[in-house]
Image (tube, rainbow, N blue to C red):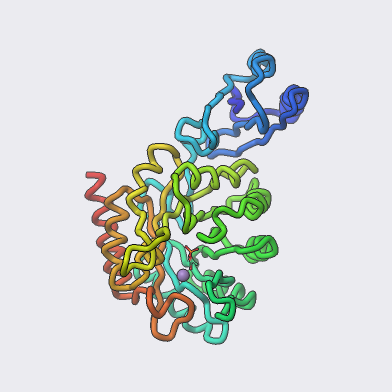
């Protein structure tokens, strides 16, 4: 990783470092941070001769050689000072709440509009809504591209940004063109490296954020952070890690709750952690306690499923969605706990 003396290098300087690293089979990837642009050396950066030549350039402050499988997402990276802002919240400064239905019902758009208004009223900063859905049963409703319009109309009506899951390459551009502020990578795709690369390529140099769920079967936290590195390596460091429970489940819960990995993640990476307790415990009555546990563990935010009338929802909503009243109370208590942790 090349750290320049100035906030960014001139095109001539970029051309020069590109030419140097190319001699050693590497390429340069600029990563635009909030304060300065850094230049990742993509490839095997261990050659001392290459490093010496780069360090000899007058405009280079230093070369960071972090021995980490995720050198951009690593806490020791220069990107550690990068801050992600979403829904008017700078992560780390205030608790971010993403809330909304699991799945948008294209036949009943009013449920989404009413839910969007209600979650805003309850204190959420970003509205979520599933357009395309990963379903275990291939015969269940799989989502509908028509719901993208409904999602964006919900954003327009409330003035809040929206988050939605993209499951395949074709969804990425559709979502970005529509104005989705946060692309969600679902638990089933968190290890789909070709999708992660496509997302990285598509969001490079854009303000878009990516909410990366933890895979259902992900073990070591390094595996989770490395998945984030796949996206960051293309130049957009706005990646939020989202523990959402793993399998096998605890008997009675939908998954094995994993908000407790938050401190482990924070030891290794600077990336903010937004916990999804809805998919973790999988039942509305268990969600508020799990949400508070996540904040107690140090989460920077929560992603909560909510619906104005859960019984009339589709996807996970009948079992998992909080009513607006419970959502409001959960957000209020979570923010109190957040303040308590900081006091
Ligand atoms: C969802 O957010 O509705 C969803 C399907 O999440 P996950 O990928 O965590 O199962
Ligand atoms: Mn869901």
Q: Position of residue 12 (x, y in %)?
A: 76, 26
* Place of residue 97 in the rendered image (x, y in percent of width and height, measured from the top left): 39, 60
Q: Please state if 288 lies on the left or on the right of 216 as rendered.
A: left
**The C terminus: image quadrant:** top left
Closer to us: 141 or 233 = 141
Q: Residue at x 39, y 85 (%)?
A: 311
In the visual, does 234 lie left or right of 225? right
Residue 265 vertical placement versus 98 (above, below): above
* Residue in the image at 42% along x and 37% along y: 268
Observer-nearest residue: 313 or 186? 186
The mark tally for this picture is 0
Q: Quadrant of the N terminus?
A: top right
Which image quadrant for residue 22? top right
Residue 97 in view in this figure: no
Q: Residue 91, percent across and down? A: 42, 48
Along the line of sight, the residue nearer the viewer: 17 or 9:
17
Residue at 38% from the left image edge and 68% from the top image edge: 254
User: Which quarter of the figure has residue 52?
Assistant: top right
Residue 36 screen position, x and y as percent:
57, 33
Residue 316 in the image: above or below residue 71: below
Residue 237 vertical placement versus 190 (above, below): above
Image height of 223 relative to 38, above or below: below
**Which residue is nearer to you in this view: 61 or 101?**
101
Regarding residue 218, the answer to whether it shows in the image is yes
């Amino acid at each position: 990783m090349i750290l320049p003396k100035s906030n960014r290098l001139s095109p001539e300087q970029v051309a020069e470092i590109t030419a140097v690293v190319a001699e050693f089979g590497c390429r340069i990837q600029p990563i635009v941070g909030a304060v300065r642009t850094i230049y990742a050396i993509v490839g095997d950066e261990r050659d001392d001769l290459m490093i010496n030549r780069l360090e000899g350039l007058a405009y280079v402050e230093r070369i960071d050689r972090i021995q980490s499988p995720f050198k951009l997402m690593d806490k020791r990276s220069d990107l550690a000072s990068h801050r992600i802002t979403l829904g008017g919240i700078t992560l780390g400064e205030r608790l971010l709440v993403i809330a909304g239905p699991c799945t948008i019902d294209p036949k009943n758009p009013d449920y989404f509009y009413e839910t969007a208004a209600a979650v805003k009223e309850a204190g959420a900063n970003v509205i979520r809504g599933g357009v395309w859905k990963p379903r275990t049963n291939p015969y269940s409703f799989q989502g509908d591209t028509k719901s993208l319009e409904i999602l964006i109309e919900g954003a327009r009506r409330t003035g809040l940004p929206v988050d939605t899951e993209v499951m395949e390459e074709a969804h990425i551009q559709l979502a970005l063109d529509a104005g989705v502020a946060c692309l969600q990578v679902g638990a089933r795709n968190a290890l789909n490296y070709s999708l992660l690369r496509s997302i990285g390529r598509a969001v490079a140099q854009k303000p878009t954020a990516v909410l990366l769920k933890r895979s259902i079967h992900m073990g070591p936290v390094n595996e989770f952070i490395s998945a984030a590195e796949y996206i960051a390596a293309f130049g957009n460091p706005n990646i939020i890690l989202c523990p959402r429970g793993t399998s096998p489940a605890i008997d009675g819960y939908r998954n094995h709750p994993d908000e407790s990995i938050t401190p482990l993640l924070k030891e290794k990476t600077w990336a903010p952690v937004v916990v999804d307790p809805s998919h973790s415990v999988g039942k509305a009555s268990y969600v508020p306690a799990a949400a508070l546990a996540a904040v107690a563990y140090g989460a920077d935010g929560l992603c909560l499923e909510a619906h104005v009338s859960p019984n009339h929802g589709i996807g996970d909503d009948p079992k998992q969605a909080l009513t607006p009243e419970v959502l409001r109370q959960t957000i209020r208590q979570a923010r109190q706990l957040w303040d308590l942790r900081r006091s």
